[in-house]
Image: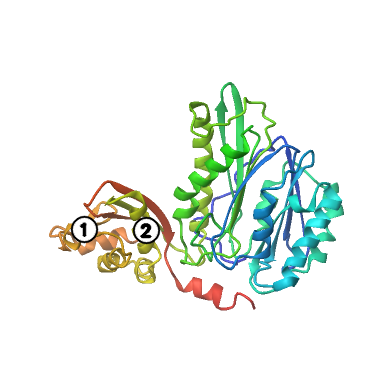
Amino acid sequence: MSSKVSPFAPAAFPALPALAGFDMATAEAGVRYRGRTDLWVLRAAPGTAVAGVFTKNKCPGAPVDFSKAALDVNAGDDPRLVVVNSGTANVFTGQAGRDAVQETARGMAETFGGKPEAVFIASTGVIGEPLDASKVTAQFADMKTRMTPDGWEEAARAIMTTDTYAKGATATAMIGETKVTINGIVKGSGMIAPDMATMLGYIATDAKISQNALRDMLSNLTETTFNSITVDSDTSTSDTVMLLASGKAGNEEITDPWSEAADPFFEALRSVMLDLALQVVKDGEGASKFITIKVTGAVDAGSARRIGLSVANSPLVKTAIAGQDANWGRIVMAVGKAGEPAERDKLTIMLGPHILATAGELAPDYKDAAGAAYMQNDEIVLGIDLALGKGEATVWTCDLTHGYIDINADYRS
């Protein structure tokens, strides 16, 4: 973890209530860190529906492979179990890494009940170092005696790596006459350019939602939340987001995710996922600016999103913003290199309320002093209109400062 807290860190961790059907515990396993928790176990009631999205990185960690397979395992009358460690990602660790996952799963099943193959496992931290599973499994018996439904903040802290603050969000919704609650935690600060989700995120609800509906909702909302953020253009080998629904609230089960009855829950889930995604960007390694990029007038939404991410991932754009330089030329460059339909003389670039460039040149009414004053803000909005169609998208990123280098140059030290 960084010793310098992000300037965008909230004053306090949000109050995430206990949820019927879930309990948890954390522990100091000493995987890599000393004097802090680095292990979290979540137990969900039998019958809990589970959905997950995982990294599309072609070199995933053994925990990702194991958890993807676990989604298709029928847990029957057994609890659904999640275990997460921080400090070591257990990625690119060969047979030793796969063995560590198997040992962890067996230990979870022996302690908490159920099938080892139904356990969900995640690891985050240094790539290339095997996980000593014995350090993890040695904690399970004690953790079982300390399980509590009210441990969300502790959980969020236990899964942190270079994060400077614990990240959580909560929302409620009405399904018919029944109030349901959604809680979520996430970790992520660097190696953030998700191609599915973010680094590690866990969302739980007491609502009764069918497995298929849960998966459809998570997949749909991922695109405009976790898949629309970037810190440094690097997609993690460990990216995992899971959504679990215990069904203990007592609502009539949602089986159609696009039904009118599902709408309030869908929107509440969207708010939690977007809140968590934006917290990751606001805790970007070394970040001093939070940047919103709004793309309009693209040929379609997919093209708009790809253009937005091209701008958001440009080191030249990000360093200019860090230096408070309204360098619109770099934005035009990043739009053009995206490989998407764009016409130079139709392009309009805006900085907050100010039009910087239009019709292929600097806007005649733009004043450098106005742009310079706006660039001093902590939160920057870039507007890009291509005037080609109705496609639009919003993506979020942060600036690139020397702090990012400081963190990553000695990450393994």
The quarter of the picture where residue 326 lies is bottom left
Q: Residue 174 location, x and y as percent?
A: 56, 27
Contact (CB < 8 A) between labels 1 and 2? no
Residue 122 visible in image: no
Q: Earlier in the sequence, mark 1 or mark 2?
A: 2
Which tag is nearer the camera, tag 1 or tag 2?
Answer: 2
Q: Secondary structure at mark 1?
A: loop
Residue 313 visible in image: yes
Residue denoted by label 2: 306
Q: Secondary structure at mark 2?
A: helix
- Please, is residue 264 above or below residue 309 in the view? above
Tag shown at residue 347: 1
The three-letter code of the residue at mark 2 reads Arg
255 left or right of 229 in image: right
The three-letter code of the residue at mark 1 reads Leu
Q: Quadrant of the C terminus?
A: bottom right
Q: Residue at x 65, y 69 (%)?
A: 91
Q: Quadrant of the N terminus?
A: bottom right
Distance, label 1 to label 2, CA atoms, is 16 Å
